[in-house]
């Protein structure tokens, strides 16, 4: 018979999205963009074209260029994730 003296629990989480990397900063969506200090505040943002970026990355991008960096269609937001999604 074995006795467990200690347990060290770990967990992981992922956003439920189809893409792995932000096309602007090239970080995974589990990681954060250069502006953030914690991954949960760095939310993915999906455009009407279905391309996904960190919300801060695409916000900075559309100040200069108002189209999707990948497919060049005019950018509009389809969905922004939050920690409850």
Image (cartoon, grey):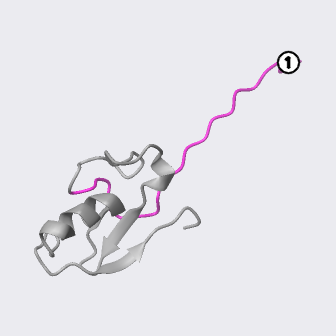
Where residue 46 appears, x then y in whole percent? 33, 72
Magenta range is 1-23
Q: Is residue 17 magenta?
A: yes
Q: Is residue 67 magenta?
A: no
Q: Quadrant of residue 5?
A: top right
Viewer-nearest residue: 63 or 55: 63
Viewer-nearest residue: 10 or 53: 53
The answer to whether residue 61 is visible is yes
The answer to whether residue 14 is visible is no
Q: Main secondary structure of the magenta part?
A: loop
Where residue 28 appears, x then y in whole percent? 33, 48
Residue assigned mark 1: 2
Where residue 34 appears, x then y in whole percent? 31, 45
Taking the spot 53% from the left edge, 50% from the top edge, the residue there is 13
Name the quarter where the C terminus is drawn.
Answer: bottom right
Residue closest to the far front: 63
Mark 1 Cα shell of 10 Å, populated few (<14), some (14-19), many (≥20): few
Where residue 51 appears, x then y in whole percent? 26, 69
Specify whether 67 is left or right of 26: left
Specify whether 81 is left or right of 48: right
Q: Quadrant of residue 63?
A: bottom left
Taking the spot 55% from the left edge, 61% from the top edge, the residue there is 83
Taking the spot 28% from the left edge, 66% from the top edge, the residue there is 59
């Amino acid at each position: 018979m074995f006795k467990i003296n200690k347990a060290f629990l770990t967990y992981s989480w992922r956003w439920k999205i189809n893409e792995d990397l932000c096309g602007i900063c090239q970080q995974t969506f589990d990681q954060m963009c250069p502006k953030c200090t914690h991954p949960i505040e760095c939310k993915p943002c999906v455009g009407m074209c279905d391309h996904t970026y960190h919300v801060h990355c695409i916000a900075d991008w559309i100040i200069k260029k108002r189209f999707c960096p990948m497919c060049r269609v005019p950018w509009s937001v389809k969905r922004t994730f939050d920690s409850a999604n």
